[in-house]
């Protein structure tokens, strides 16, 4: 009898334990269902589209956001290849993306930007892939981001940049034509008047009656000759005739020489690689103006006692290098592009117009080097006959220490330079 009562008591205890465990299981199931429902809501109504693809790119699962994006019911999308929604021009990129997904094991997840067909027409999306599962049953979780607005902004920004570049190029072209016109007028009018003045002074110096004021006549001749040289230099800055007639190498050589004479800063010019080629006129003009502005900065800001200009062609690129031994720039100034003036802005714009890049290397007390690098493609043409400059040594050119020029001569013995 006692054994039966004991057995009955054990059964009642176990029954209570089963009831407690059953209640716990019911509570756990309810929590799991709540978590599942929360996950389903987060998955279906996420701001981005989510898909699960098999190794062939067939849709296994898709959330409501992605289904709405494609303008179809989820049930109709399941089992379809995603490739069918990719615009024809991007299908090769999508297939390459799937190959990367299948071969991905570690590192950054594969990413691709595509244009896909949606219920609202073609739109740009970005797909990010994360593989999961075993090798025998591998799936690919795909996040789909709508980047259509970003692509439109990028296209708008690119169009604005192209319009800006075209406007800058047009303004610079108009500026060059105006400079050519002003230089021609100065040459034709002031130049002729100055020539007439020098001839009259020469006749006056030869007149025996001018003996008492002969010294002053000679001083006036010196002043007129210096004025003539300055006039040649500044009209050359407006539009050098050598640039049109002989090309960039000869024009830069002449400009560096005249710049050195005018500002009394020893300077040298070296070139290499242009013996049988000439640069197209527009590119010649931009490179010449770039060098002109760089040397103006040397004179205005560097305090240099020597400078060098190097123009060379090698490895499919052209290089223009302007060096000086001036006071240099602080690192912050160098990263900003020197003094940040309009001259440097113009230099950078000219570099951009010829698909080139501009860099500045400098350190306090160690001078400054300005680099312009641009591709040779479509910038060269067969050279016409004319002076050729000596080639510089191979490799990165290192200018020799400039030799100091002889001091100016004075008196009427100086001959006027030909215009």
Image (cartoon, rainbow, N blue to C red):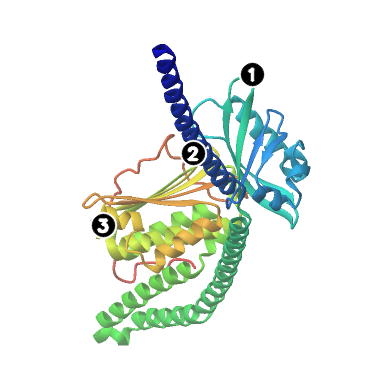
Q: What secondary structure is found at the residue carrying circle 3? A: loop
Which one is in front in this view, the residue at disc 3 or the one at disc 2?
2
Q: Position of residue 405 (x, y in %)?
A: 30, 55
Which residue sits at x=70%, y=48%? Answer: 67
Name the residue carrying label 3. 304
Name the residue carrying label 1. 136
Q: What secondary structure is found at the residue carrying circle 2? A: helix
Name the residue carrying label 2. 27
Image mark for residue 311? none
What is the C-alpha distance between the residues marked 3 and 1?
A: 72 Å
What is the C-alpha distance between the residues marked 3 and 2?
A: 85 Å
The crowding category of the residue bearing disc 2, from other C-alpha atoms within 10 Å (few below 14, some 14 to 19, many at least 20), is few
Which residue sits at x=57%, y=35%? Answer: 110
Which one is in front in this view, the residue at disc 2 or the one at disc 1?
2
Camera-nearest residue between 365 and 71: 71
Q: Is residue 273 visible?
A: no
What is the C-alpha distance between the residues marked 2 and 1?
A: 36 Å
The crowding category of the residue bearing disc 3, from other C-alpha atoms within 10 Å (few below 14, some 14 to 19, many at least 20), is some
Query: As drawn, which residue projects farthest toward the left?
Result: 365
């Amino acid at each position: 009898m006692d054994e039966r009562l004991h057995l009955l008591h054990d059964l009642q205890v176990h029954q209570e334990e089963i009831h407690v465990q059953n209640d716990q299981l019911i509570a756990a199931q309810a929590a799991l269902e709540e978590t599942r429902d929360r996950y389903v809501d987060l998955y279906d109504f996420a701001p981005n589209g989510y898909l699960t693809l098999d190794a062939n790119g067939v849709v296994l699962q898709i959330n409501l956001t992605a289904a709405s994006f494609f303008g179809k019911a989820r049930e109709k999308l399941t089992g379809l290849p995603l490739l069918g929604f990719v615009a024809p021009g991007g299908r090769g990129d999508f297939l390459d993306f799937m190959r990367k997904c299948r071969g991905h094991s570690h590192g950054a997840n594969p990413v691709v930007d595509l244009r896909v067909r949606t219920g609202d027409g073609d739109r740009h999306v970005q797909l990010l892939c994360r593989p999961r599962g075993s090798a025998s049953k591998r799936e690919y979780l795909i996040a789909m981001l709508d980047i259509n607005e970003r692509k439109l902004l990028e296209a708008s920004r690119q169009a604005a940049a192209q319009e800006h570049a075209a406007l800058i190029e047009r303004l610079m072209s108009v500026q060059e034509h105006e400079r050519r016109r002003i230089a021609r007028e100065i040459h034709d009018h002031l130049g002729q008047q100055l020539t007439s003045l020098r001839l009259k002074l020469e006749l006056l110096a030869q007149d025996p009656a001018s003996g008492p004021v002969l010294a002053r006549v000679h001083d006036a001749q010196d002043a007129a000759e210096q004025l003539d040289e300055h006039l040649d230099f500044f009209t050359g800055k407006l539009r050098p005739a050598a640039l049109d007639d002989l090309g960039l190498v000869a024009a830069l050589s002449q400009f560096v020489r005249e710049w050195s004479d005018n500002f009394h800063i020893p300077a040298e010019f070296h070139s290499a690689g242009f013996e049988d080629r000439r640069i197209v006129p527009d590119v010649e003009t931009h490179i010449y103006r770039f060098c002109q502005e760089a040397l103006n900065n040397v004179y205005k800001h560097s305090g240099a006692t020597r400078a060098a200009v190097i123009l060379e062609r090698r490895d499919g690129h052209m290089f223009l290098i302007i060096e000086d031994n001036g006071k240099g720039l602080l690192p912050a100034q160098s990263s900003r592009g020197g003094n940040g003036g309009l001259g440097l802005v113009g230099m950078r714009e000219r570099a951009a117009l010829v698909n080139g890049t501009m860099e500045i290397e400098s350190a306090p007390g160690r001078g400054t080097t300005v680099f312009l690098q641009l591709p040779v493609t479509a910038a060269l043409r067969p050279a016409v006959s004319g002076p050729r400059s000596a080639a510089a040594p191979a490799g990165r050119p290192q200018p020799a220490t400039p030799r100091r020029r002889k001091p100016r001569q004075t008196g009427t013995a100086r001959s006027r330079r030909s215009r």
